[in-house]
Structures are given as structure tokens and as C-alpha cells.
């Protein structure tokens, strides 16, 4: 009789230990969602290249190209979240679009025709026409220049605060 009671306690302890280890493992797995900065840059660069290849390979019209780049940019802005400053610049010299998300503590401006324009809105969607081949973006007073080629272009600027340090992803 004592032997069966000991087996019951042993099996109970093993079951409880297994459940505890399972819960700890699952919570650790769920907590590891953040990508590293270099992984994020690589991911966006690969996806951006694939998008441009898709546009060229399928010979998409200007309207269809715009729609694909707009959706791509909006998806990444949503994926990055509202706490990150994320800006996507796409199009060509005839039609250039800037969309993004800007937090209140960030300064963002651009110069595409010879004069600097300060952006005050937190949610950004700007369409421009007749821009220069070299355009400039200013993120917290740091200048980032982009060459606008005759075909389709897509660039990004992402400001990310992590452990009281500021990181800028530029591509």
C-alpha cells in the first residue's frame, strides 16, 4: 500500500514539473519577438529588392507600381509600430511619395525642390511632383541624401530608441 502511494506522489511531482517547465519555455519563446537592427535592415533590403524586381518583371504601370510600393511601406510602418519613427520614400522624379510615422520628439523635414519643408504631422503622407534628382531628408537635423533615378525608387529612414540610445536605419 505504501509503495503505490509513493508512486502516485512521484508521478504527480513529475507532471507538475513538466507543466512548470512547459509554461516557462513558452513564455520565454513568446518574449523573443524583437528583431535585431541588422536583421531588420537586411529584411527590409531583401523585401525592397524583391518588390522592385516584381515591378520590373511584371512591367507594372505607374499606378500599379505606386499601389504596390504604398502597400509595402504601410505594412512595414504598421509592423514597426507607432513608437518608432519610420519613413518610406518612393516613386520617381515625376511623382515622389513620402509616408511615415513621426513621434512628437522627432524633427523631420525634406528638401526635394530646393527649399526645406518641416513636417509637423505625426502621420505623414505627402505626394510631390517634379522633384530634383538628388533629394534630402533631415531626421533630427542629420542629413540623408537620396538619388532619385528615372525608374522606380524606394528608400527608408527608421529612427529607433533602444536602451537610451538612438539608432538610425537608412536604406
Image (cartoon, helix red, strand yellow):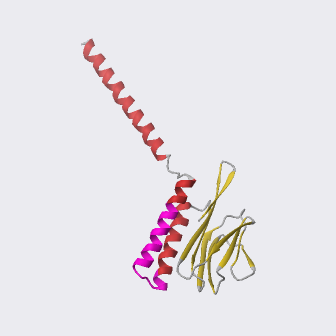
Q: Position of residue 55 (x, y in %)?
A: 44, 77
- Most distant residue in the top direction: 2
Q: Is residue 82 left or right of residue 11?
A: right
Q: Position of residue 85 (x, y in %)?
A: 63, 63
**Which one is in front, 32 or 47?**
47
Magenta stretch holds residue 45: yes
**Which one is in front, 114 or 23?**
114
Q: Which residue corresponds to the image point at 58% horizontal and 79% vertical from the top-left?
A: 149
Magenta stretch holds residue 49: yes
Q: Which residue corresponds to the image point at 67% horizontal and 76% vertical from the top-left?
A: 135
Q: Is residue 77 above or below residue 129?
A: above
Question: Which quarter of the rendering shows the C terminus?
Answer: bottom right
Name the magenta segment's main secondary structure: helix
Q: Is residue 79 left or right of residue 113?
A: left
Q: Which residues are magenta?
A: 43-64
Q: Quadrant of residue 23?
A: top left
Q: Position of residue 69 (x, y in %)?
A: 50, 75
Q: Quadrant of residue 132?
A: bottom right
**Which one is in front, 162 or 114?**
114
**Which one is in front, 166 or 45?**
45
Amino acid at each position: 500500500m505504501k509503495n503505490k502511494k509513493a508512486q502516485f506522489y512521484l508521478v504527480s511531482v513529475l507532471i507538475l514539473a513538466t507543466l512548470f517547465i512547459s509554461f516557462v519555455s513558452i513564455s520565454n519563446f513568446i518574449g523573443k519577438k524583437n528583431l535585431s537592427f541588422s536583421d531588420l535592415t537586411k529584411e527590409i533590403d531583401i523585401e525592397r529588392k524583391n518588390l522592385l524586381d516584381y515591378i520590373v518583371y511584371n512591367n507594372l504601370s505607374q499606378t500599379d507600381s505606386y499601389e504596390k510600393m504604398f502597400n509595402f511601406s504601410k505594412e512595414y510602418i504598421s509592423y514597426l509600430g507607432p513608437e518608432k519613427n519610420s519613413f518610406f520614400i518612393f516613386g520617381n522624379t515625376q511623382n515622389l511619395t513620402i509616408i511615415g510615422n513621426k513621434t512628437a520628439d522627432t524633427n523631420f523635414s525634406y528638401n526635394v525642390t530646393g527649399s526645406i519643408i518641416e513636417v509637423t504631422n505625426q502621420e505623414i503622407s505627402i505626394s510631390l511632383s517634379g522633384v530634383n534628382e538628388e533629394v534630402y531628408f533631415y531626421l533630427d537635423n542629420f542629413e540623408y541624401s537620396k538619388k532619385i533615378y528615372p525608374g522606380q525608387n524606394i528608400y527608408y529612414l527608421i529612427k529607433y530608441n533602444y536602451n537610451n540610445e538612438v539608432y538610425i536605419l537608412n536604406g
